[in-house]
Image (tube, rainbow, N blue to C red):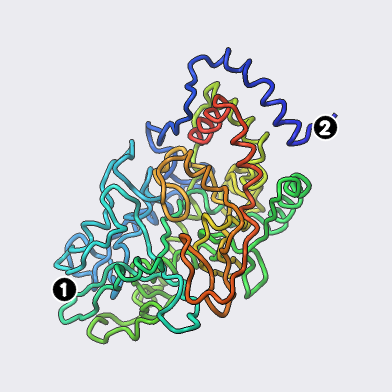
């Protein structure tokens, strides 16, 4: 007889007490075991690559770690193009935990405990920036986005990144006048949301997963998802109508677009995909006094033959040839948690396995890999909404965050609001409430605050994860702890 999710829950509850006899060492109060120690379980090249492909990966990883300055004239900061506004000065500054290519660094890292590098960056090389309140030495690397643009009666959506620092005052930016945004005022208006870096390991496998595979994977779980109120849709690229899959809202179609956007927005480096110097919505034009280089600042080297690849192309190579994170050996508790993961329905969004198509790269054809994501968008409700519209993703929709490598991550959820995995799980639950926006005006609530003005509110039906979190809450403490142990093994 086929067991349903409800039957499975009853089974888990029935055996939970007997399990306590087996797992006498488990504590009653559930606790996140914390980031896993030992060597970084990621950061190297994919195992099946040829010797030449491995060399290309190593070279690309070196470029990924390059530090940017305004014109590349400062020792140790040989990259050119920083600013006029920026959040970081190196890809690896943000993507470094537990190894180069990962996510935000932090003081609690067992592999490389360091303070948030954005703090020291504020005044590096003579810059005159003030560290905003949301950047702390023990917190995550963050980018801020504004929800609404300024103070018109019908405030249009902003949604764009407002970089935290400018090059004003730097020794390599003489004469530049460009003050920081007024984050104090915008924070007081609850108009700022945050994003933290997503890990980049194994993304060549994700990129080479056919759309048909993703659609079939979603369809295969439809009946079980329906029983728990889980929907799911893909962010569709408007140019070719294929599935977009990179970024917190799956807003980026390809690894090059993902890299090119980050290079331009996070570091201010113009490139062949994003060719123009930018300032955020409502901030006017880029001051001429702060433009020091021809654009694009990163481009294919056409002065040599054959041409040399641009940095953006090289960043794509690094991500495309990167190995996925390696899970740890499962303890008895983690083995139990793996079963619980499926029983309560976590696997209905965090799909354990997908398979690639044929690939031109060594060993990457028809590979079954384990991202623990369906790469679909799901409504997460008023508790997690950020009010940002990207592609076809609505204000409270997010791509299912892949869980591979979560065992060594320090911060969780799109804004890094917690470093506790148990809190992150519980935050997936959200009651109905105002959380969405119309696409021509901004009328919704974020952090419980209405955005300008509220003559219209669209209500969400709550998080699609509510049923799963209800199942989690019904687990006995032993099973809840086992699930946490399983997740920290990934």
**Compared with residue 204, is residue 446 higher up or lower down, i.e. above or below?**
below
Q: Tag 2's secondary structure?
A: loop
Foreground of the two, 155 or 259: 155
Quarter of the rendering occupied by the N terminus: top right
Mark seen at residue 169: 1
Q: Nearer the viewer, mark 1 or mark 2?
A: 2
Q: Which of the two residues, 259 or 79, is positioned nearer the viewer here?
A: 259
Residue 394 in which image quadrant? bottom right
Q: Give residue 167's position: percent from left, percent from top.
A: 23, 72
Spot occupied by residue 179 in the image (x, y as percentages of width and height): 24, 76
Disc 1 is placed on an element classified as: loop
Question: From this viewpoint, is residue 81 visible?
Answer: no
* Residue 451 located left or right of residue 350: left
Mark 1 vs 2: CB contact within 8 A: no
Question: Nearer the N terminus, badge 1 or badge 2?
Answer: 2
**CA distance for labels 1 and 2:** 68 Å
Task: Report which quarter residue 433 is drawn in.
Answer: bottom right
Q: Position of residue 235 (x, y in %)?
A: 62, 64
Q: What residue does disc 2 label?
A: 2
> Which residue is at the front of the view, 17 or 307?
17
Q: Residue at x 50, y 33 (%)?
A: 489
Please report the residue visible at 41 percent of the width from the left and 66 percent of the height from the top: 262
């Amino acid at each position: 007889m086929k067991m349903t999710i409800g039957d499975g829950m009853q089974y888990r509850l029935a055996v939970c007490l007997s399990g306590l006899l087996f797992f006498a060492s488990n504590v009653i109060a559930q606790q996140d075991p914390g980031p896993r120690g030992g060597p970084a379980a990621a950061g190297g090249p994919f195992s099946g690559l040829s010797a030449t492909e491995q060399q290309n990966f190593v070279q690309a990883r070196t470029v990924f770690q390059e530090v940017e300055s305004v014109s590349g004239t400062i020792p140790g900061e040989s990259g050119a193009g920083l600013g006029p506004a920026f959040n970081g000065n190196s890809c690896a500054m943000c993507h470094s935990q537990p190894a180069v290519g990962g996510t935000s660094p932090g003081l609690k890292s067992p592999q490389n405990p360091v303070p948030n590098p954005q703090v020291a960056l504020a005044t590096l090389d003579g810059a005159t920036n003030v560290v905003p309140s949301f950047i702390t030495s023990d917190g995550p690397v963050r980018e801020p986005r504004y929800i609404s643009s300024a103070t018109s009666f019908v405030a249009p959506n902003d949604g764009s990144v407002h970089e935290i620092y400018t090059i004003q005052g730097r020794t390599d930016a003489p004469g530049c006048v460009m003050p920081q945004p007024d984050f104090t005022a915008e924070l007081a208006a609850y108009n700022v949301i945050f994003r933290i870096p997503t890990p980049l390991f194994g993304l060549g496998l994700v990129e080479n997963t056919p759309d048909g595979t993703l659609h079939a994977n979603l369809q295969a779980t439809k009946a079980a998802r329906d029983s728990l109120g889980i929907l799911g849709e893909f962010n569709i690229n408007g140019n070719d109508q294929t599935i977009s899959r990179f970024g917190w809202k799956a807003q980026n179609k390809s690894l090059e677009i993902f890299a090119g956007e980050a290079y331009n927005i996070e570091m201010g480096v113009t490139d062949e995909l994003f060719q123009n110097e930018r300032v955020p919505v409502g901030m006017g034009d880029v001051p001429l006094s702060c433009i020091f280089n021809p654009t694009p600042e990163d481009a294919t080297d056409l002065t040599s033959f054959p041409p040399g690849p641009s940095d953006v192309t090289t960043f794509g190579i690094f991500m495309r040839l990167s190995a996925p994170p390696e899970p740890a050996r499962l303890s008895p508790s983690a083995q139990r948690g793996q079963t619980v993961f499926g029983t309560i329905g976590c696997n209905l969004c965090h799909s354990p396995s997908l398979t690639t198509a044929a690939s031109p790269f060594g060993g990457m054809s028809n590979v079954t890999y384990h991202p623990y994501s369906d790469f679909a968008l799901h409504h997460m409700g008023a508790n997690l909404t950020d009010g940002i519209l990207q592609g076809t993703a609505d204000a409270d929709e997010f791509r299912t965050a892949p869980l591979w490598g979560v065992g060594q991550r320090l911060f969780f959820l799109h804004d890094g609001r917690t470093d506790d995995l148990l809190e992150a799980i519980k935050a997936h639950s959200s009651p109905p409430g105002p959380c969405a926006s119309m696409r021509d005006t901004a009328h919704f609530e974020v952090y419980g605050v209405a955005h300008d003005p509220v003559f219209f509110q669209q209500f969400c039906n709550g998080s699609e994860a509510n049923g799963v979190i209800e199942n989690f809450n019904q687990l006995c403490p032993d099973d809840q702890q086992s699930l946490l142990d399983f997740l920290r093994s990934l």
